[in-house]
Amino acid sequence: MDAHRLSRRDALRTGTGLLGVAGAMALTARTARAEPWKWSPADSVVGVGGGADPMTIYDPDADSVLADAIQHADVPQINRLLATWVYNDQALPAGLPKGLADFIEDARRLPSWADQGRLASSFEFTKKRGTYLGVLYAFASGMMSTVIPHEARAVYYSRGGSHLKERIAKTAKFGYDIGAVNAYGDGGEMIVTCVKTRIIHASVRHLLPQSPHWPADVTPISQDDLMVTWHSLATTIMRTLTAWKLPIPAAESDGYLHSWQLAAHLLGIRDEYIPSTWDQANAQAAQQLDPILAPTAEGHDLADQLLNLGADLDLTLLSRGILGAFTRFIMGDKVADWLTIPREPVWSPLLEVAWGPYVAVREGVLAVAPVVDAPYWMFDEFLRQFVLWYMSELRMPLSIEIPLTNR
């Protein structure tokens, strides 16, 4: 196994051999859709739109500004200045290039359809289910990203692939900021986090096509790619919570959707592609996300690294085996087999038998626990330790910066 993994990584680093060729062919194929784009903008948050296939649309306003900054400005100085911009209501630091400052001022505005009441309901949702969300952001969304071919390859060959722990910390910050009480309000950070992330995406679109490992005629991170990632987060999490039969009030479910609708808008996704309801989100995901999940060598390598991240804490309940068991339980056998995650002999059957009753008891649905206390304690302790680990990444000095290099 180790020799196999080493040879695979060597092939990835050099960009030679069948892996490099297959990756380039797969990326090129993903620039065309097997079926015509069918989702209607009438089902979006604004109810109108041109209906163009999002696979052909990018983010021209951000792209032109960031290309100019990378080519002509002092990017390290820009990053130093942007590191001081933290809060939604905070003025931009002086000294940014005018084009970039103008872009940010426009990009940070909430849309006319933002609803503070729905955002308050979103916080109620997060307050009750923050522990579940911390785990799902990692095991549902984080591990799913490794079997989204375009995303896995874009991460692997960009700077994020060689600075994976830093990238995980930034993802953790995104998940934390969207769940804060004032996420989109004064003193919150979600608007800043989204706009900085949009800037990073534009930088990657400029830099990654310059990599010798990336096909020259493929532009990364289209509107379609952004929506695929959005569904791997918002839609996948709601699908999972629904499958767990959590009793979620309609207003809180709608509020959580609204928080992600605003995140999509601030990330530069066109309003015509943002679903208006969970039903529409599921319908869109059925076309954009579900059919494209597949293994890649790059994604396999990233998943391997993710499963080893907990080892630094030397905690039994964050071992690779237990993290793998949760991945198999949440993502299913097919994805786990793609990532060659073995079935864990103790935790896998325990999760299958006891997780449903555990969730029911935790939510107050059952009056009497149908399983013994030990599994309950282990589940609670795992969730507690995992979320502490997840959140601890936010304590490191963290600034979402414009990259200047690929992997």
Image (cartoon, rainbow, N blue to C red):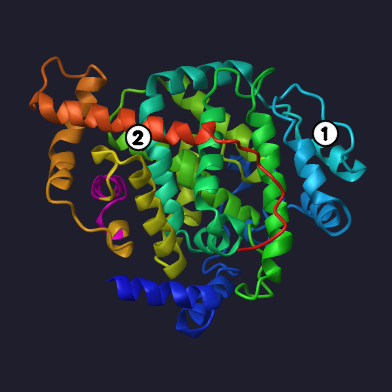
Which residue lies at the image location 72% right of the left edge and 49% below the top edge?
Answer: 402
Looking at marks 2 and 1 on the same chain, the residue that comes earlier in the sequence is marked by 1
| Quarter assignment of residue 224 | bottom right
Closer-to-camera residue (119/73): 73
Which residue lies at the image location 39% right of the left edge and 19% below the top edge?
Answer: 128
Closer-to-camera residue (81/227): 81
Q: Which residue, as the protein is rendered here, is positioned at the far right?
A: 98
Rendered location of residue 124, percent (x, y): 46, 17
- Tell me if residue 93 comes above or below residue 249 in the rendering: below
Q: Secondary structure at mark 1?
A: helix
Q: Which region shows up in magenta?
A: 321-334
Badge 1 is on which residue? Answer: 105
The crowding category of the residue bearing disc 1, from other C-alpha atoms within 10 Å (few below 14, some 14 to 19, many at least 20), is few
Badge 2 is on which residue? Answer: 386
**Distance of mark 2 from mark 1, alpha carbons?**
37 Å
- Tell me if residue 283 comes above or below residue 161 in the rendering: above
